[in-house]
Image (cartoon, rainbow, N blue to C red):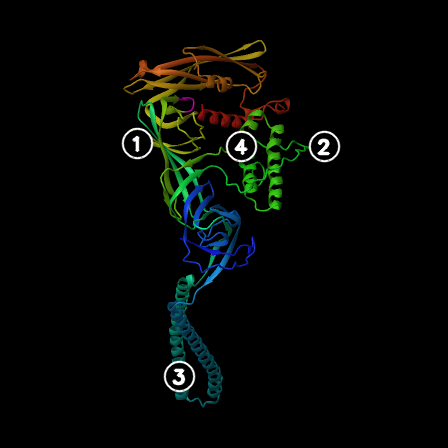
Amino acid sequence: MTRAIVRTARAGAWAFFGAVALAAAAAPAAPPAGEIQSVTLYRDQALVTRTVPADGPAGAAEAVVSDLPERIVPDSLFAEGDGAEIRAVRFRTRAVGEAPAAEVRKIEAEIEDVERAVEANQRMQALVSERLAYLGKLENFVAPTVSVEMAKGVLNADALKAVTLFNFEQRKAAAEESLVLAKEARALSKRQDLLQRRLQETSAGSSRQVREAVVFLDRKAAGKASFRLSYLVAGAGWTPAYNFRAEQGGQTFRAEYNAQIRQQSGEDWAGVRLTLSTASPSLVAEVPGLAPFRVALAAGGQAQSQDGRSYIMSSGGSGKSRSDNSIAFRQARTAEQRLGLNWAWNEAANKDQFQEFVNPKETVILIQKAVADAPSVEYRIAAPVSLASRPDQQTLRVSDMKLAGKFYRVASPVLASYVYREAELTNASEDALLGGPVNAYLDGRFVGRGEIPTVSRGETFVVGFGADGQVRAKRELVDRKESVQGGNREIAFKYRLVIESFRDEAVQVRLQDRIPVAQRDADVRVTLGEMSDKLSADLVYLRAERPKGILRWDVDVKAKASGDQAKFVTYDFRLEYDRNMALGLPGQIRPGAQQDGAPNPAAGQEEFLEMQQNRAKK
């Protein structure tokens, strides 16, 4: 618990930012304890607010709030007073020492004993080495002497035997002693390591550094007063996660909105008012400046273009995106820091804006969506929350809501024979739903994972509920005719799409297929012919997908519809193009077509990504 030490000063003896001690009017009583009252949890930081009592007579005072968490952001400290006016707040660290404990002294004595034993062991090993060296010299003396005496015929065999046996016995004894000493040295080394670890663990609390906030305040009147001390901490954040539950044929869906919380700030939050926020904490009131946007030309140079996806993955082509610089600017401490970050912010915006001059419209729209600032949303948790500082993630329920929606199936037989379940839901809650991962449950069974985009209040979005194993689809080529008419080649196609259902109830299916779309209208003419069923009347589909060659039929499939009872959809279309040209995919465009103004083949991926984003929200 934080200890707040309030010292009353005589009127006029004030120091706003210095460390000048204020003369005390009376000896302070036992300092009251401050408590963490509220926490605003951002995506990568948290704003913690403590309430600290500051009762006493009117006048100037200094309060010291100690034991701040290890991962505090020092420049983020600020305070607000209740019954007291805040003059200044500053941060400091202070070393705290304690007398060595008896256990520490005992371990240190054991370490000294081991060190003496190590020294004795080393001396004995040196003595053994000297003995072996002496025996080697003795051997070098005996061998030449034996040779001389043998040559003269005066060799004393008994003396030679005695010297030889003595040499080998001494070498054997020295080797045995060396082995014993080496074993003892290893044991002493392990003992030393163990004692050093014990000493570090035992003495860890004997010297530490505390972090403190010094708050200079002025009490307006005698009696009760307090102040709120707020600061940012790192090592904390949250991400949204959802569980969507549905029943077959149901029109109401249950959405569980959870927050996956990371709390490693170094302090526990017990019974606090918690707010989850998608905003970025701001400690700066200054307005950012907009710099001129200058461009230049280089003779014979190429436009500095980059395909949209690569540009997005490289954070706007620079080390930091506009969003990164925006956050750093709002938390900068000094005017010099803010000025540098404001310029870096403009530089990142220059790179984003330049893409409008070198990329097609579809790519620019995709980039603008990717680099746009996320919406700022707050979720206030009604009940008090306790979150311990610990390495693993913690899950908190934000809300449990019911959403209106409708089930249908989606079939794209050109991709697969599987038919997938999907629900179109409307966010009727009071708050936006942030983009995040989804666990989908159908009739109480887990059916898979997905993701939803950020959904505003009242907005419609879709959630997938996996493949329906009782409904199948296939695509059949019924006929293909090729002919040459004048200078053009003409190919006529007829297709049949089949949906079979083995379910006991009728189902609605959004059946999808596609016809070719020419890179340039002048190259290939595509004409859609007769159809057995009308295309979908959905306005979003007609506006966004039909012009891109996507065909969609909204059909009802009867129960137990298989074989001849299956649902059949037929259609035909015709291709016409120059008989002297070859049909190919965008990556196979004839040489020179790019220079003639044909779109970049990579733009197809950008177009698809944009369509997928639009499909996720209606």
Q: Nearer the viewer, mark 3 or mark 2?
A: 2
Instruction: Measure how far apart labels 3 and 2 are at the Cα level.
Output: 96 Å
Residue assigned mark 1: 445
Query: Which residue reaches farthest bottom?
Result: 154
Whether residue 612 is situated above or below residue 573 in the rendered picture: below
For marks 2 and 1 on the same chain, the one whose residue lies earlier in the sequence: 2
Q: Inspect this view and state whether residue 265 appears.
A: no
Instruction: Indicate the amino acid at tag 2.
Output: Ala
Please, what secondary structure does the residue beneath circle 3 have? Answer: helix
For marks 2 and 4 on the same chain, the one whose residue lies earlier in the sequence: 2
Q: Main secondary structure of the magenta part?
A: loop
Q: 296 or 46, which lies in front?
A: 46
Please, what secondary structure does the residue beneath circle 2 have? Answer: loop
Q: Inspect this view and state whether residue 571 appears.
A: yes
Instruction: Measure how far apart labels 3 and 4 are at the Cα level.
Output: 92 Å
Q: Which residues are magenta?
A: 411-415
Residue assigned mark 3: 166
For marks 3 and 1 on the same chain, the one whose residue lies earlier in the sequence: 3
The reply to whether callout 1 and callout 4 are in contact (CB within 8 Å) is no
Residue assigned mark 2: 299
Residue 288 sits in quarter: top right
